[in-house]
Image (cartoon, helix red, strand yellow):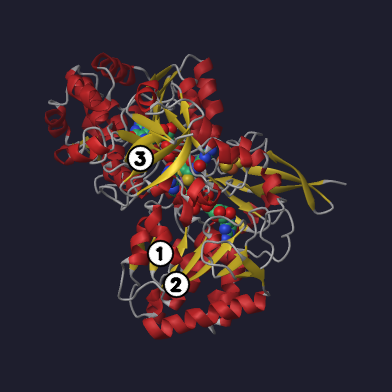
Amino acid sequence: MPEVRHSVCALDCPDCCSLLVTVENERGIKLRGNPDHPVTRGFLCGKVAQYLEREYSPARLLYPQRRIGAKGEGRFERITWDEALDTIALRLQETAAKSGPEAVLPYSYAGTMGLLNFGGMASRFFHRLGASRLDRTICSSAGMAGLTEALGVRYATEPEQFRHAKLILAWGANVLGTNVHLWPFIMEARRNGARLYTIDPCRNRTGAASDRHYFIHPGSDTALALAIMHVIIGENLHDADYIERYTSGFAGLRERVSPWTPQRAAGLTGIAAEDIVSLAREYATTRPAAIRLNYGVQRSERGAMAIRTIALLPALVGSWKEVGGGLQLSTSQAFRLNSDALERPDLQWKSLGREARLINMTELGRALTEVVNPRVEALVVYNSNPAAIAPDQNTVLAGLRREDLFTVVLEQFQNDTADYADILLPATTFLEHTDIYKAYGHYHLQLARPALPAPGEAKSNVEVFRLLAARMGFDDSCLRDSEDDMIRSLLDSSHPFLQGITMERLEREHSIRLNVSEPGTPYLPFASGGFGTVDGKCHFRAEELDYTPPIESRHGDPELRDRFPLELISPKNDDSMNSTFGHRDTVDRQTATLHLHAEDAAPRGIQTADSVRVYNDRGSCVLMAQVDGTVRPGVICAPSVRWSRRSPRKRGVNALTSPRLTDAGGGPVFYSCLVEVERIGD
Ligand SMILES: Nc1nc2c(c(=O)[nH]1)N[C@H]1C(S)=C(S)[C@@H](COP(=O)(O)OP(=O)(O)OC[C@H]3O[C@@H](n4cnc5c(=O)[nH]c(N)nc54)[C@H](O)[C@@H]3O)O[C@H]1N2
Ligand SMILES: Nc1nc2c(c(=O)[nH]1)N[C@H]1C(S)=C(S)[C@@H](COP(=O)(O)OP(=O)(O)OC[C@H]3O[C@@H](n4cnc5c(=O)[nH]c(N)nc54)[C@H](O)[C@@H]3O)O[C@H]1N2
Ligand code: SF4
Ligand SMILES: [Mo]
């Protein structure tokens, strides 16, 4: 008889879905969204609805392997776990003895969001070793910095409350593609008369399904937000009462935004002045109005400032006090788990007597080719595919090719990074191991037990680092902890949001809403102040607000713009999860596409289905042109991220992206990228 087991989708997605897996003879035969979960509500996105294809793909890595070809070539031979672990332990010990443990760099991101496998046992292991620490900036650090500047604490409107909004702004947020479980709440609001507007350089499915789509030039959102404030304050549409009670610095804000006329912003953003005026009026006068701000906005050179400025808007119009108002970027900070107990940063003192050096993951290329004292000599990659997803790919690959670099990769599939491994270890999927999940798009904490057996000899990250710790002779008891021990250490927190949430309850209920408000009542984080500042007020600090166009943009460096006149963005592909589904042919085709406008295509002799070479001073890649209305003239869009190993000349879109960092947070600037495009001859 088939049995239904609970699980949680571990992909790097705000929705963090509750899953039901139907299992027969220990084989998964059906995967669906849990109908009883308040956000999942019984459905899954298209990519994970088919996850059993990935689970049982013949391309899954099943055994430890050793590289026998050249780095990047992808030729390997099977070895035993004992051999693999001995080789790794010996190399890490030798490296640490010769050059110091900071010559070892762990590289990981959110291939799984499960906290134990994201960084639990691995963090303990690398802290105990005294390895370099990784600054995990690749996705959201600029946005987090900007949001913290604006609000002091990163709390957000609950997805469940969007159903009460009358106006929803999807601002750099492809809801249908990357956050589809918000969509039913938006549809419910629209059935009750709400309007949905999108602000995006790309008219994707979400833009097409909106009541209005505002094409904005990449990296110009701060100018738009300042002009919206100009109109709101100039026309006296702000919420004087909310401002008086719960904010500070309003007089300065009024002064700061006075030169930010809609006309001025129109030139910078490409949005007509009268549209900016009407958008501002509607935003201030439609009650309640909610903003879904996503991370697209902060992948540009001054992305932190953009997030910060936009995030001040709800305080200006008082929409934080309304059910269905406010703003959501991320909910994750509300999960006040005891991460120090899980990750044990204190172990660094045992190994090094201090904190280890910090290496910014966005600068991996530089870290592998330029950083010294010590040089990175061993790289351990898990939950990430840096050969495809990191910016400035040519430098990253030059680093990965170094013969003196020892690279270990824990992976489920033979992807770009796996091709560069010296030792390649087979990893379990989230359906096969225990983990605990916070979300970044809702407030429900979830536990998952293995729903399916691991195939071949695949092991979880937790298990691999536990085994390695033993091999290295580390005798700290926390390095022998079970998954349940680790979960209990995480739950050991006195924060009121976690009160009453225990392992036993999680086991029984699978998903538990944080105690952010009384059960059944909406959570309004800033209805009456409560900002993360000393006085609980939202500080406008207007003198710090400012807009400068990205260097790599149409209003940026003129010399660069003359040579590379097109602004390239490479946002998420609807059917992808970064590079995770790169083995699928449909995904490969979608991410081989370059959308461009007819006005840019015609003078270059480019037509739909032509092969084109996209290039700048950093590199080039080959894509297939699609001339359509997705973008405006001057902007081109390549849905991402394709596997380079499947791409012509083994280079993907990140061969073009810049190694610059954002204005705050040290994040990548994927969407501030000037290029030129040419048709490849027949
Ligand atoms: N289907 C799918 N879902 C995903 C992912 C995926 O790869 N595929 N990835 C997951 C991950 S890692 C993350 S971080 C989230 C991210 O989720 P999102 O932040 O929603 O995704 P992005 O595609 O990065 O950016 C969102 C939108 O911002 C737009 N954009 C780009 N530059 C600008 C700009 O300067 N201004 C404005 N206003 N908009 C801009 C893009 O065109 C895009 O439509 O999604 C997660 N979910
Ligand atoms: N041009 C461009 N580049 C981008 C972006 C963009 O929008 N444009 N987006 C950026 C963003 S927002 C992000 S978050 C990064 C994401 O970049 P990555 O964090 O590298 O994410 P993925 O490409 O999804 O790769 C995750 C890998 O983890 C593996 N994995 C999954 N679960 C486990 C596990 O339990 N154990 C182990 N060992 N492995 C596991 C998967 O098989 C997969 O290969 O990409 C960034 N790169
Ligand atoms: S990727 Fe996102 S929407 Fe899809 S199943 Fe996972 S959590 Fe849900
Ligand atoms: Mo991300």
Q: Is residue 367 above or below residue 260?
A: below
Q: CA distance from mark 3 to mark 1?
A: 23 Å
Q: Is residue 604 above or below residue 135?
A: above
Q: Amino acid at mark 3?
A: Tyr
In terms of sequence position, does the residue under pointer 1 or pointer 2 come before the other?
1
Measuring 62% from the left and 41% from the top, which residue is drawn there? 585
Q: CA distance from mark 3 to mark 2?
A: 30 Å
Measuring 56% from the left and 33% from the top, which residue is drawn there? 181
Q: Is mark 3 within 8 Å of ligand 1?
A: yes
In terms of sequence position, does the residue under pointer 3 or pointer 2 come before the other?
2
Count of numbered labels shown in the rendering? 3
Q: Amino acid at mark 1?
A: Gly
Ligand 3 quadrant in view: top right
Mark 2 neighbour density, 10 Å: few (under 14) some (14–19) many (20 or more): some
**x and y percentages locating residue 134 in the rendered image:** 40, 63
Q: Are marks 1 and 2 in contact (CB under 8 Å)?
A: yes
The residue under label 2 is: 405
Q: Is mark 2 within 8 Å of ligand 2?
A: no
Residue 328 found in image quarter: top left
The residue under label 1 is: 399
For the residue labelled by badge 2, is the local secondary structure a helix, a strand or a loop? loop
Q: Which mark is residue 266?
A: none
